[in-house]
Image: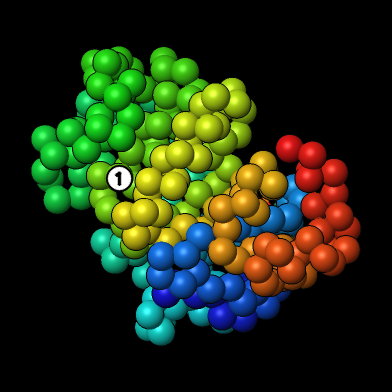
Amino acid sequence: MLALEAVYAGYGGSTVLRGVDLAVPDGSLVALLGANGAGKTTLLRVAAGALHPTSGRLTLDGEDVSRLAPNALVSRGVCPIPEGRGIFPNLTVRENLSLQALDGNDKQALERAVSAFPRLGERLSQMAGTMSGGEQQMLALARTYVQSPRIVLLDEVSMGLAPKVVDEIFEFLDLLRRQGAAMLLVEQYVTRALEVADFVYLLNRGEIAFAGEPSELKDTDVFSQYVGADLGH
Ligand SMILES: Nc1ncnc2c1ncn2[C@@H]1O[C@H](COP(=O)(O)OP(=O)(O)OP(=O)(O)O)[C@@H](O)[C@H]1O
Ligand SMILES: [Mg+2]
């Protein structure tokens, strides 16, 4: 289990997260909701080791990993898919996939990625940055299939994509989950996220305003208060 315990974190002198407690149990899908600027991306950066808490801790199976570098967390099975995708636009699809292979097993990485997203297989020599938004997101997500991580951190992976591609991405998340990966999901399609989530956290100005099961959230007014009109998605 990955957990944030009483985490404070921010940038320079400004504090963004204020005493955040959040847990991602093994194999579970946890949705993180909140308005723009609430601190969702900041929370995912803490979970990935890209930003260290100023107080509180990040733990993995109870062990304090707050001071570990992102790469050390990757090798322990924590796999971030950052906002903006985290691929190399000036490298080909093939080169991107071989960089995703942690153990240097390029061939296997390529085979697995293409089995999950056949469209990537048709574009191995194409510069990643010239692919469509949906294809780029598939390339970014292929990492999670290649590395078989324990916990995947997903920051608005459906952002700006056509509905059909969003469907494909949610199908892929379901596949990942059936393989046993846990997920912490930040998603603009709130209703969809709630449909697939085991637990949901609502972040309001850097503080957790709600934590519980999706069904409980529907009975409260915190949802409309902090997430607003997004329910229509
Ligand atoms: N690198 C940075 N330096 C300084 N301030 C930052 C930095 N990144 C984010 N912030 C600030 O931290 C706060 C939280 O930002 P964050 O990106 O975590 O929000 P978010 O919930 O992901 O929002 P969105 O839904 O718009 O993606 C915002 O006020 C933002 O301006
Ligand atoms: Mg964000």
Q: Quadrant of the N terminus?
A: bottom left
Residue sitting at 68 percent across and 72 percent down? Answer: 211
Note whether 188 is above or below 78 in the view shown: above
Q: How is the image coloured?
A: rainbow
Say above or below: 101 vs 182.
above
Residue situated in front as seen by the camera: 215 or 139:
215
Q: Relative to residue 170, is residue 12 drawn left or right?
A: right
Residue at left offset 61%, top offset 77%: 21
Residue denoted by label 1: 145
Locate residue 30, reporting x and y percent. 55, 62
Q: Residue furthest bottom?
A: 62
Q: Relative to residue 115, is residue 216 depicted above or below?
A: below
Tell me the kind of residue under disc 1: Tyr
Q: Ligand 2 near label 1 (Cβ, under 8 Å)?
A: no
Mark 1 lies on a secondary structure that is: helix
Residue 36 is left or right of residue 126, and the answer is: right
> How many labels sit on residues?
1
Residue 40 visible at all: no
- Residue 224 occupies which quadrant of the picture? bottom right
Q: Position of residue 82 (x, y in %)?
A: 49, 45
Which image quadrant for residue 71? bottom left
Residue nearest the viewer, comparing 4 with 152:
152
